Amino acid sequence: MTFHMDIIRECLASWVQLRICQLLMRQPKPMSENQMSRLLDIPLTTLHRSLKSLGKTRLIKAHRVGTSSYWTLDDRSYLYATLKPILEGLNALTPPLNFLKEMILSQLRIPKGYRLILFGSTIEGTDTSSSDIDLCVVYPDSLVGPDARFQGDLERLQESCLDKFGKSLNPLFVKDSILAKNPKKALYVNILQGTEIRP
């Protein structure tokens, strides 16, 4: 740990790190990275990067069991004592990503056979103030393209994203068969690692 105020900013640097701390605050027993990844719906690589960053601040600590690391908050550390009231208060908040998912479901009438997948920096926790919100719309092969009603809903959702988050919604339309046939293409790998939005 370093002795400057930036150390607190480092702990609160991303929503992923805050969610990790919030989860560990609720779970007194050490948790594996796989458990946390599943519960938080965060890719393992993103989670691992954030755990390493938090570990350097001494807010959390790792317990080695064989080849696996199990993590807990370090309740003896300065940062735990300092940030505990903030972390406890986070339980009352709706995470921005959950708010976004709820907003999408409430504003889009999703036609039968469509799939919506949030992907990219928004899901990975690496977004910046200039990042877009990437949304893949996977539609059935039987259609030439998305229907007009859905397009209208999507335009209104784009306005809402700008109003609520100050970010543009970047929709990407992909036919189901194209996504299925190209699972190793870099863009499609990114999409398939995203989070599907289900009612």
Image (tube, rainbow, N blue to C red):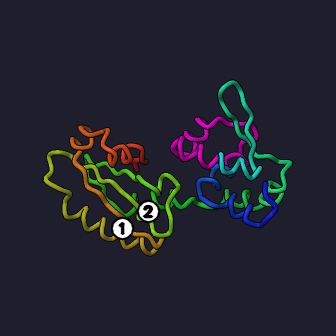
Kindly identify the amino acid type of the residue bearing the numbered disc 2.
Met
Residue 159, relative to residue 42: is it above or below? below
Residue 5, relative to residue 87: is it above or below? below
Q: Residue furthest front?
A: 2
Q: Looking at the rendered structure, which numbered label has been put on residue 103?
A: 2
Residue 100, relative to residue 64: is it above or below? below
Q: Which residue is mark 1?
A: 157
Whether tag 2 and tag 1 are in contact, CB under 8 A, the answer is yes
Residue 148 versus residue 6: which sits nearer the camera? Answer: 6
Give the position of the N terminus as an image quadrant: bottom right
Residue 198 visible in the shown view: no
Q: Looking at the rendered structure, which numbered label has been put on residue 85?
A: none
Q: Position of residue 31 (x, y in %)?
A: 68, 37
Residue plotted at (40% across, 50% down) = 197
Q: Which residues are magenta?
A: 23-51
Q: Label 2 to label 1, Cα distance in Å? A: 8 Å
Q: Position of residue 111 (x, y in %)?
A: 26, 53
Q: Position of residue 79 (x, y in %)?
A: 80, 56
